[in-house]
Image (spheres, rainbow, N blue to C red):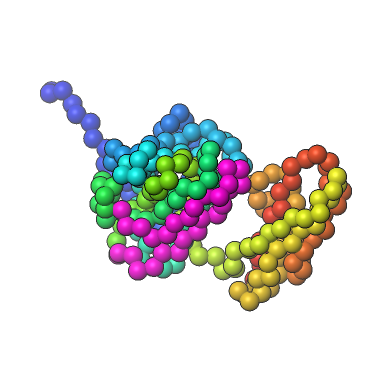
Amino acid sequence: WSLPISFTTLCSSVSSFTEGFESTTGTNFPSCWFKVGATGTANTQASTGFGSTRSLYMYSSTSTSRAVVSLPPVNNADADTHRMVMKVRANFTVGETIELGYLTNPADASTFMALNSIVTNSTTVPQTFSTTPTGLPSGDVVFALRTGTALLSVLIDDVTWEPLPLCPDQTGLVVANITTDGAETSWDDMSANGATGYEYAVTTSATPPTSGTATTDTFYVASTLASNTVHYLHVRTSC
């Protein structure tokens, strides 16, 4: 036999996926995630602030050296039935742009086609970055993430390609008049968007609970909370 050479077959396309990076180690990417091209920096790392222990780190070192990371290929991007949702936050300094797009050539970062973007506004509180793409090519599509030109590092977690929800996403969560054992909470009225009610929960975990308390109100006065303790307000719509 001659000396063997190795090769890796291409990733199969999927109709949905969720990636929280918890199975990664060191700076390694999950299966079918790749840094594309030689510019910028991207890797997985241990991090906090997302309710989990690991996330994706991205950084563009110059305005012409931008980091690009490709996601697993999907086979239903042209169906207009799914959305891409993820949590993002600044690493050290706010103000960097994160773009979601797709690659017409998955091996070439210069073929990035931008679809949507968000600018980081916090180093501690994650933002939800949601995109419902339309008019995409038929067949397999490789989505990708790209950082902007502010030259600031960002963290990304809980990346999900999922069917469009039947109920609208809840917005406008507010917490006010915090005391030693309570707080006044409220959220936007989503009835015009199809919501018929809400579920809320106040917990000590950033991870959403499996269920909450049903209500048709857009407020809740929390009481009997533990003092000097971080709490999280969770609200979702019902239809």
Can the viewer see residue 32 in this picture?
Answer: no
Residue 211 shown left or right of residue 31 in the figure: right
Q: Residue at x 45, y 36 (%)?
A: 44
Q: Position of residue 144 (x, y in %)?
A: 37, 50
The residue stretch that appears in magenta: 112-138
Position of 24 relative to 176 (above/below): above
Residue 60 shown left or right of residue 158 in the figure: left
Q: Residue at x 30, y 64 (%)?
A: 137
Frontmost residue, 213 versus 206: 206
Position of 139 relative to 49 (above/below): below
Q: Position of residue 83 (x, y in %)?
A: 46, 61
Q: Residue at x 16, y 23 (%)?
A: 3
Q: Residue at x 55, y 54 (%)?
A: 128
Q: Position of residue 206 (x, y in %)?
A: 66, 46
Q: Is residue 113 magenta?
A: yes
Q: Position of residue 140 (x, y in %)?
A: 31, 57
Quadrant that contains the N terminus? top left
Frontmost residue, 140 versus 228: 228
Quadrant that contains the C terminus? bottom right
Residue 163 shown left or right of residue 138 in the figure: right
Q: In the displayed image of the protein, which residue is found farthest to the bottom?
A: 192
Q: Is residue 132 magenta?
A: yes
Can the viewer see residue 48 in this picture?
Answer: yes
Frontmost residue, 203 versus 147: 147
Count of numbered badges drawn on the protein: 0
